[in-house]
Amino acid sequence: MFRNVHVLVTGGGGYIGSVLVPRLLKEGYKVKVLDRFFFGKETLESVSKNPRLTLIQDDTRWFDPKILKNVDVVMDLAALSNDPSGELDPQKTLDINYKGRARVARLSKESGVKRYILASSCSIYGFRDGLLSEKSPINPLTTYAKANRLAEISAKKLASKKFIVTLLRFATVFGYSPRMRFDLAVNGMVLGFFKNKQIPIMRDGTQWRPFIHVKDVAEAYVKVIKSPADKINGELFNVGSDEQNYQILSLAKEVAKSIKIPFKKKWYGDPDSRSYKISFKKINDKLGYKTKFTVGDGSREIYSALQKGTLTDSIKTRTVEWYKYLLDSKKIADSIVIKNTVL
């Protein structure tokens, strides 16, 4: 691509960002992180003294566009980060996950940024039968999924020869991160086994979902940033692996097998309205991208860390509960006021 690449990562202190940012620094890139840091700056503590890292505590909806000066690539991850979180306040989810990212994309193009990479989600497919590709009809069922789709549309419209836009629809993420999340399927199952010797499973267990390790997510960003423009400009990629499409009950059994715990389950919730099995052939064929880590790998690393006490469960590891706490305590009141200058 080009030397001395300067990357801006929005949401760089989050679950994926706190794995991605060290990976980018390891590659030799200069990195700016734009984040509200609702989960603390300690998520990037391991790289906090790196001279090529700059942390900016601000919001995608109203940050000063000057921070985009001399930035080559924007990786736009900042969002309320799953379907349940998105329903806490649907309008604010749209303001942040759609309008905030639309603003980042537009300002990036205006500021001369060369590449823009949007983090989207396979949840956009909602409920569909069969193996789904990027050309398959979508069925976004939640505010989170709908906001992702709107962000995809707005970003793709900006693509040009001088502004390379790539849309990445990620499978459900798992694995250890400094900003740990136990509200994700695999991670929550491991925690359930560790604490209660049984796995919590959302009814009815037959729903399909694709999965990807957080380190493989970071690797996908590196693969895209290094890819020729003609292979990625205006392109949409599902990101994950065909082998890690699981029905939830089968996934739970795989987690139990991986950490060598007798399989016991505990049902919870109403039957899940989302079910989708995804093809990842396009990113494999076009970019040569393949995942390296399995559900077993992720399960074992988390279980081992819990056993050693290097990883613990807290309200901060459950996204919805933490957001509710911050809202109730008015600690993020300023962040949910929509300013007139957003778009």
Image: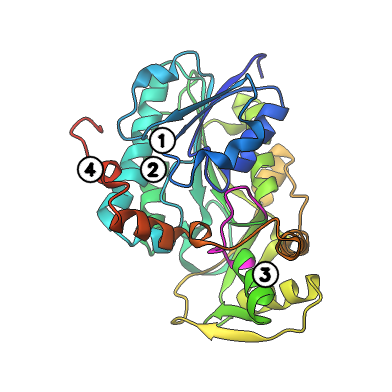
Q: In the picture shown, does residue 94 fall above or below 126?
A: above
Task: Give the number of the mark in front: 1 or 4.
Answer: 4
Q: Which residue corresponds to the image point at 46% horizontal and 65% vertical from the top-left?
A: 126
Query: First in sequence: mark 3 or mark 2?
Result: 2
Amino acid at dot 4: Val
Query: First in sequence: mark 1 or mark 4?
Result: 1
Q: Which residue corresponds to the image point at 34% horizontal and 38% vertical from the top-left?
A: 100
Query: First in sequence: mark 4 or mark 3?
Result: 3
Q: Is residue 137 visible?
A: no
Res 201 quadrant in image: bottom right
Task: Give the number of the mark in front: 3 or 2.
Answer: 3
Q: Is residue 179 magenta?
A: yes
Q: CA distance from mark 4 to mark 2?
A: 20 Å
The answer to whether mark 1 and mark 2 are in CB contact below 8 A is yes
Numbered circle sitting on residue 337: 4
Instruction: Name the residue that disc number 1 marks.
Output: 155
Query: First in sequence: mark 4 or mark 2?
Result: 2
Query: Which element carries disc 1, helix, strand or loop?
Result: helix
Instruction: Name the residue that disc number 3 marks.
Output: 190
Q: Is residue 261 left or right of residue 250?
A: right
Q: CA distance from mark 4 to mark 3?
A: 37 Å
Q: Quadrant of the N terminus?
A: top right
Numbered circle sitting on residue 151: 2
Query: Which element carries disc 3, helix, strand or loop?
Result: helix
**Badge 2 local density, few (<14 within 10 Å), some, or many (20+)?**
many
